[in-house]
Amino acid sequence: MENFFDCDYPTALRVVNDLMTSRMKQFEHVVANELPVMYADHGLDAAARAALDRHVEELKQWMAAIAVWHAETRRYRAEDLKRHHAHRPAVAGGAVTPNPPGRGRLLPPAPHRPAWA
């Protein structure tokens, strides 16, 4: 976010928090308000409703697991990030710049990432 929006860390943190919070609220709204309407509109029987309810529970567990992984992985610890960036080439002035700054900078498509991602 800092690189994409060319902003400082506190601003980037607020953007990420707002995005994550809004997505979670949207998910909760769909589960609480839209799924029951869809069940009724499509006349789903108890078995179909139970299958979708199980899927919703799996999504909840998946989201929780992702949050735990990000909190516990070494990938994002300050000392590991410093070590990782120490291997990048220095630019003018000796600063390490992993990505060129600029508002709205998009990553190029990669073999493992669809072009629309």
Image: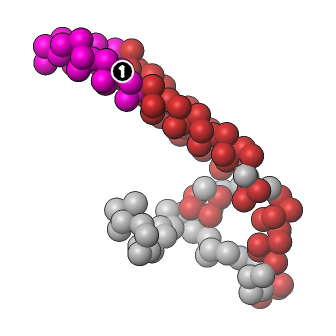
Q: Main secondary structure of the magenta part?
A: helix
Q: Residue at x 82, y 85 (%)?
A: 93
Q: Does residue 53 appear to the left or right of 98 in the view shown?
A: left
Q: Which secondary structure lies at badge 1?
A: helix
Circle count: 1
Front-most of residues 117 and 42 = 42
The part of the image, by quadrant, that contains residue 27 is: top left
Which residues fall within the magenta stretch?
33-56
Q: What residue is shown at x 82% (from left), y 78% (from top)?
A: 86
Name the colour scheme.
secondary structure
The residue carrying mark 1 is 53
Q: Amino acid at mark 1?
A: Asp
Give yes or no for residue 35 being in the magenta stretch. Answer: yes
* Residue found at the far right of this picture: 79
Measured as percent of width and height from the top left, residue 82 is found at: 83, 68
Along the viewing direction, whichever of 100 and 25 lies nearer the viewer: 25
Q: Mark 1 Cα within 10 Å, few/some/many (few <14, many 20+)?
A: some
